[in-house]
Amino acid sequence: MELGIDVGKVGSHAVVDVKGEIDVYTAPKLREKLIELVSEGSSDIVVNLEGVDFLDSTGLGVLVGALKRVKAHEGSLSLVCTQDKILKIFKITGLTKVFPIHDTVEDAAGS
Amino acid sequence: MARVEMAIPSRPAYVRLVRLALASLARSSGLPEEAIEDLKTAVGEACANAVLMTSEAGGDDPLRVRWNDEPERIVVEVGERVPERETAVDTSNGVDSSGFDTRLVMSAALLDTLVDQCEMVRYQGGGLYARLTLDLPAPV
């Protein structure tokens, strides 16, 4: 399955809608997109994971790397996720304390 | 009791194939959906670790996956017979160095949590494999 990535804008936030499976094969594509956004000047980013069916540590590593990049530009990276199976991955790895995780894109962009 | 063995190219593109195959086997064994998701994630982690390790070592050995469906447990083994690395970790796999170190820690946390037992076992002649054990509930 290909990883689908669409980028939009809500207020001052770049919103990255991700669909499919984020794993060792597809994670580099997400990493490239997030690096591109930051290098183009977007430092407040929302990553919408509602369309993600699978997430592994490679995908988590990409999100952590992106968080470090936006923080270096005094920006923010928030996530949108309500799926129990994906939230479980964030809880096990302790990343619920690292990322703001919201129920909707609007909430995330307003935070 | 069923035993299934697969050998696939040790490349990231094939990891999904292993996840889907083992999820299908787990479904056939009557595992509940949440346990299947946990197993898929754990197997995905073991495969990703093995594939990245092979890539760093410059090896091209196939990724070997073995499924053992026993009465009281399911055992999955994932590994490669590649020589062990003596050099530092090469992080040219698409994840930056800080992200890669973080990834290993997170992968270990997922493996420790999602299956009942995860151990690394040495192949005779070189290489490592992960042995994941999922205990099955006793029949009512």
Image: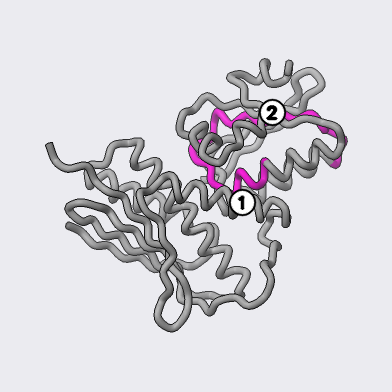
Q: Chain of mark 2?
A: A
Residue A50 magenta: yes
Q: Which residue is mark 2?
A: A78
- Indicate the secondary structure of the residue bearing disc 2: strand
Q: Position of residue B124 (x, y in %)?
A: 40, 81
Question: Spatial distance from mark 2 to mark 1, Cα to Cα?
Answer: 19 Å
Q: Which residue is mark 1?
A: B103
Mark 2 against mark 1, which lies toward the viewer? 1
- The amino acid type, in three-letter code, at marker 2 is Ser
Q: Chain of mark 1?
A: B
Q: Position of residue B135 (x, y in %)?
A: 27, 48
**Number of numbered markers:** 2
Relative depth, front residue between B131 and A22? B131
Residue B105 is left or right of residue A84, and the answer is right
Span shown in magenta:
A39-63
- The amino acid type, in three-letter code, at marker 1 is Arg
Q: Residue at x 65, y 37 (%)?
A: A5
Is residue B14 shown above or below B86?
above
Q: Residue at x 30, y 57 (%)?
A: B75
Which image quarter holds the N terminus of chain B? bottom left
Is residue A63 shown above or below A84?
below
Residue B35 magenta: no
Is residue A69 shown above or below A102?
below
Q: Position of residue B116 (x, y in %)?
A: 35, 49
- The figure's colour scheme reads one colour
Q: Are marks 2 and 1 on the same chain?
A: no
